[in-house]
Image (cartoon, rainbow, N blue to C red):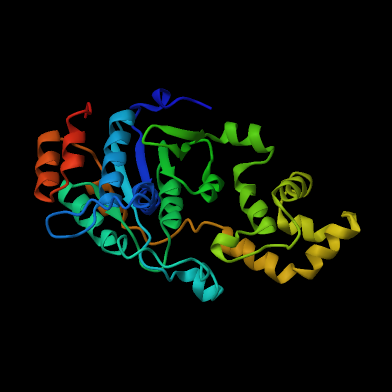
């Protein structure tokens, strides 16, 4: 996989899955009860981690534009399709809840572009942006986004700290998995995603799912060729066909949500002033993040 230095500049647009970074950094410190309360008694550990991670990415990539995307609430259009979608997820810890709004306040005060649409997930906003712009670098922890790889964008999946990622391009993905990235949604449909509350075909795991899609191309062709499958796999698919079809719908990222492109065009170009950023962070009593700015070449 390519190193991050190869991605610097070149009119890149950095797109960040904000909730992925907020959750990641909250849990990275919360297990030690390091919630980093500010002067108002609000925990800030997730906010400070997310802000520092974002600033490090800006230093690393030197992007021309940046957009931070957010999930907006626990209910989305997918709950209208399937009421149990993500219903088995635990409620967020009480120390994290106030940070959902607080992180957006801090990001807004810094002046970075951020967007979220009620009823849709950050993945759907990212998918829509991927149809509007080339040269995206998408940062998340969500492997579902790999279905968006198309030769004009890269996806960085968080690995360790602020600087280590699994970097995917279309060619890297195809070499690793032997399918086109757009077929990844079919694999996900077969194997399901228990974390999101849908289960695909019971008894079909990742290895078998990839094998079936390599051989048949997509779910539609697979269903047209059930007679060519082993009796065991065929019986599993026939027993869970309704689940499979719903899983396919749930797994597919929506790429035409009503993102305000005029807002993105106006707000996303980056003009970094470290002094101003430090002033905002100091005003929010985010001293760890403010000191971190001094270590960066922004």
Q: Where is residue 7 drawn, in percent x and y?
A: 40, 27
Q: Is residue 122 above or below residue 164?
A: below
Is 120 situated left or right of 235 in this image?
A: left
Q: Where is residue 298 drawn, in percent x and y?
A: 21, 29
Q: Where is residue 5 drawn, in percent x and y?
A: 39, 23
Name the one closer to the observer, 204 or 82: 204
Q: Where is residue 153 drawn, in percent x and y?
A: 46, 38
Residue drawn 63% across the image and 61% down it: 248
Q: Is residue 238 above or below residue 232?
A: below
Residue drawn 60% across the image and 43% down it: 181
Query: Where, by quadrant of the figure, is residue 41 drawn?
Result: bottom left
Name the one closer to the observer, 146 or 97: 97
Residue drawn 48% across the image and 56% down it: 255
Is 7 situated left or right of 188 in this image?
A: left
Q: Is residue 19 above or below residue 239?
A: above
Name the one closer to the observer, 106 or 79: 106
């Amino acid at each position: 996989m390519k190193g991050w230095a190869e991605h610097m500049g070149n009119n890149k647009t950095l797109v960040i899955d904000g909730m992925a970074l907020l959750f990641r950094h909250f849990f990275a410190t919360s297990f030690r009860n390091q919630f980093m309360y500010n002067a108002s008694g609000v925990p800030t550990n997730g906010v400070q981690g997310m802000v520092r991670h974002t600033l490090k990415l800006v230093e690393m990539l030197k992007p021309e534009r940046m957009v931070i995307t957010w999930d907006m609430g626990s209910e989305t259009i997918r709950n209208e399709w399937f009421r149990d979608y993500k219903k088995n997820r635990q409620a967020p810890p009480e120390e994290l809840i106030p940070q959902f709004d607080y992180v957006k306040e801090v990001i807004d005060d810094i002046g970075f572009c951020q967007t979220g649409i009620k009823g849709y997930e950050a993945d759907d906003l990212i998918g829509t942006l991927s149809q509007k712009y080339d040269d995206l670098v998408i940062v998340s922890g969500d492997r579902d986004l790999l279905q968006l790889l198309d030769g004009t964008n890269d996806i960085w999946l968080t690995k360790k700290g602020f600087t280590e990622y699994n970097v995917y391009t279309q060619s890297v993905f195809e070499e690793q998995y032997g399918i086109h990235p757009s077929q990844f949604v079919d694999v996900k449909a077969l194997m399901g995603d228990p974390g999101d509350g849908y289960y695909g075909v019971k008894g079909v795991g990742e290895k078998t799912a990839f094998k079936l899609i390599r051989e048949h191309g997509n779910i539609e062709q697979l269903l047209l060729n059930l007679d060519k499958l082993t009796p065991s796999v065929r019986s599993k698919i026939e027993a869970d066909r309704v689940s499979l079809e719903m899983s396919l719908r749930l797994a597919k990222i929506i790429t035409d949500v009503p993102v305000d492109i005029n807002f993105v065009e106006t707000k996303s170009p980056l003009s970094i002033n470290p002094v101003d950023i430090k002033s905002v962070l100091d005003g929010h009593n985010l001293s760890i993040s403010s000191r971190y700015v001094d270590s960066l070449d922004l």
